[in-house]
Image: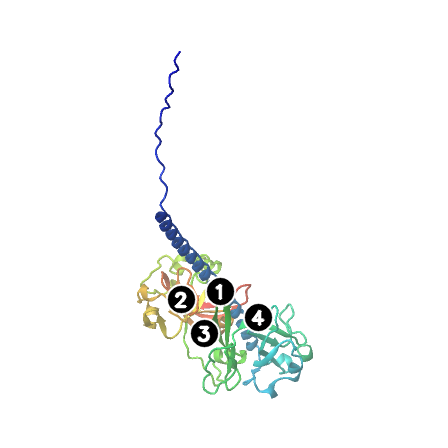
Amino acid sequence: MAIKPVHKRQIDRPSIAGFTLTELLVGGVISFFLITLSGYGLVSIITTSTTTNAQNERRVELNRAGDFIAQEIRTAATIVQDASISSEQPIEFLSGISPDISQVQPVLMLRMAQTNLIPIVYYLATPPNGIWQGPKAIYRWGPAYDDQGTYINPDAPTQWPHEPLIDLIESEGSLPTCETNWVGSGTPGFYVCVNATGDIAKVYQTGRINKVLAQTDTYRYSSTTAIRALEFAQTSGTSLGTTNSTACLLVMDEDSIDSDIPTIQDAAQNKGISVNALINKNNPTQLGNPTFLWNTSYTGDIVTIPTGQTGDEGVFSLPQTLNGQNGPLSLNDFLAGNLPQTNLDEVLNIQPLGNAQLNDLVGQSCTAIVYDSDISINVDPLQANLQGARLGRFNFTVQAVVPSSELSKLTIRVD
């Protein structure tokens, strides 16, 4: 039997073609650029976020330190005009300085009635390596406080501690300029101007902000504070050779005036009207600043209102000269509500008020432009976004400040 030959059937398979070397190289280059751009964008976002957080934290720290100093200035009997004069510095202060700190420079000295006029000293120094960071730190030498805010051993300066108040204070920069007949002491990081009669001090602090990649920036805080005796004379009409001729012009946002604030709700309920009608919240506007119904129909009310919290303040000072991103702005047009929205972004020197500045409002009759929402603040440079709807113009006299766990509240009389 013959054997038949076996023929294998050929199966056609499609050929599989790969990428050419050129295509691989082009794809690799494109992927490299895409990854590089994405990484750069991510780094940029992280850098911006970190910088903003650092600025806000630094601003809060400097404001708190400034408020503490201002409160003590208010209780002083007098302010030493030139703290750099060694004969003015107490022996106990000089002998009690720790050898761990160096380059001590007194900047502010307050003579207190409680201490038999032995001055409390705020001074600048280079801190030791450790918790407190340089280049400089502000220290306080004076009696400690008890839980009730009362001095401990006010008449025993040998027992007064040297305590750091705030660190990361700049050592370089330009010195502030004091007014005529005022005397300045300090460095660019901590500087004080004192008037000729020793009852008003202007305090300047410049703090360092540590950014990413070993970069630094600065933030400056300043305040003007008078001793209480002078403030009483100014508000009661007694002449002490100093007058306050600056109008009280403010900007307020929803943290201070809003329909959900209990004291404002109570005021509206007592009148039998809606709270929205009382503060014009039933008709917010971007054109014009109508006077509150509270002012036109219900003057004389006494009410206590909040002022926000540190880092999210609700009351801001309005400078006498307005400047926006497009140049100078008319203050009268702003108060009347006639400025276009495009001109109200990045308005310079809208200062959020801390406790020290709120105390300065006592006795003043103020006009506030009230916004329907939160006001956004940038700290470096200091500028505000004043765009958005407004409730209108609110007139009142500040009668007192009320201490609070956050910022002090204001007791006002509606005018």
Q: Mark 3 points at which residue?
A: 364
The answer to whether residue 286 is seen in the rendering is yes
The tag earlier along the polypeptide, 4 or 3, is 4
Distance from disc 3 to disc 1, alpha carbons, whole Å, reads: 47 Å
Q: Mark 1 points at which residue?
A: 213
Quadrant into which the N terminus falls: top left
Tag of residue 288? none
The residue tagged with tag 4: helix, strand or loop? Answer: loop
Tag of residue 384? 2
Q: Which residue is drawn at 36% across and 65% down?
A: 345
Distance from disc 1 to disc 2, alpha carbons, whole Å, reads: 28 Å
Distance from disc 4 to disc 1, alpha carbons, whole Å, reads: 18 Å
Q: Locate residue 237, reporting x and y percent.
A: 47, 81
Coloring basis for residues: rainbow
Does residue 128 lie above or below 45 as drawn?
below
| Residue type highlighted by circle 1 | Leu
The tag earlier along the polypeptide, 1 or 2, is 1
